[in-house]
Image: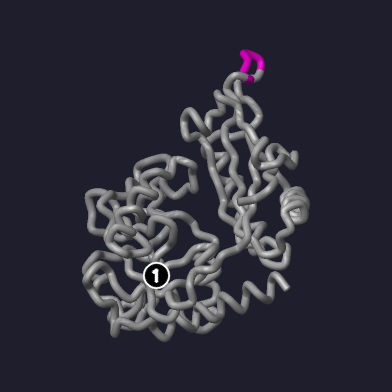
Amino acid sequence: MSDYISINGQLTPYDDARIAPFDAGLLHGAGLFETLRVRNGKIFRGAEHLARITASAAVMNLPFTLGLGQLQEMMADLLEVNGLTDARARLTITRGDLHEATAEQPEPPVTLMLSASAFAPYPAALYEKGLTAIIAPYKQNPESPLCGHKTTSYVDRLMALREAQKLKAGEALWFAAGTNFLAEGSISNVFIVDKDGVLATPPLHVPEKTNQRLCLPGITRQVVLGLATEMNVLPHERMITITELLAAKEVFVTNAIMGVMPVTHIEKHNVGNEKPGELTMKLHAAYNALLETETD
């Protein structure tokens, strides 16, 4: 746990940190967050993370503006006071203290929190042997206005992860309500190498329904799409059925902390030959190399 946390730009000892009792993040879950990978004091793909949370804030009518330079300066101060260089950081914004709303200014200033803790990587054995995932017992709702946004209304994801952990699994894969189409993981985006050797991942939006999001526009997801293209592997963003998922030669999941993580079992089903696939490991290595290059 950090010794200090940044609240509205002010460094505060963790034990003294406070938010208002009427903060909308506490009362209504009205907030957004970004999980950031920091290496050598540098935020990996910080501009992309900031662009995503800013776009989501606009959708949720949160009056949020923060420049990349401001974020980098805040992060540098936070890392220094906590004695960190490699960190897992989190940027959180909420709608703010509703008690401060007035007739003249009905939208209070957002609450902005930045925290960081020492980076703890996933065990190397998971990358060597692969992760087990379950099918989430809950469904993704593309018609929800929160779908595809990284909101602080996150308890359903944690409930699904808890179900996965009960079964000694590390991720729960969500399908869209009323369909058998794959959406995303509880904390990740999902890729497959299908039975024909084609790299595929669910699209951001439901086809022909651009107002319905299917999954989070993951920053790591976007990096992997770019890396695949550089390898002359054409990635396909398309709908994926449960049948295609179970028939896939390779499956992997992505996020800012795990990078590219192979999935070798889906519940009791074996993925491929029960070992991390060739393309998965190439993308894993390429992602790690890019992370090092951009943060050296």
Q: Horizontally, is 179 left or right of 3 in the view?
A: left
Colouring used for the render: one colour
Q: Which residues are magenta?
A: 100-104
The residue carrying pointer 1 sits among few (fewer than 14), some (14 to 19) or many (20 or more) residues within 10 Å by Cα, namely: many
> In the image as oriented, which residue stretches furthest toward the top?
103
Residue beneath the point at 56% across and 34% down: 61
Q: Is residue 69 visible?
A: no
Q: Closer to the camera, 178 or 220?
A: 220
The residue sitting at the front extreme is 15
Looking at the image, residue 97 lies above or below residue 289: above
Residue under label 1: 191
Q: Which secondary structure is most common in the magenta stretch?
A: loop
Q: Nearer the viewer, residue 18 or 51?
A: 18
Q: Is residue 199 left or right of residue 92?
A: left
Above or below — where is 48 with respect to 233? above
Res 293 → quadrant: bottom right
Circle 1 — which element? strand
Tally the numbered discs: 1
Residue drawn at 50 percent across, 67 percent down: 258
Residue at 60%, 63% in the rendered image: 119
Residue kind at label 1, given as amino acid type: Phe
Q: Position of residue 172 (x, y in %)?
A: 33, 59
Image height of 282 relative to 18, above or below: below
From this viewpoint, is residue 283 visible? yes
User: Residue 296: x and y, percent?
Assistant: 73, 73
Q: Position of residue 87 (x, y in %)?
A: 64, 61
39 in the magenta segment: no
Residue 208's spot in the image, x, y percent? 35, 53
The quadrant holding residue 23 is top right
Depth order, front residue of 124/54: 124
Residue located at (42% from left, 68% from top): 253
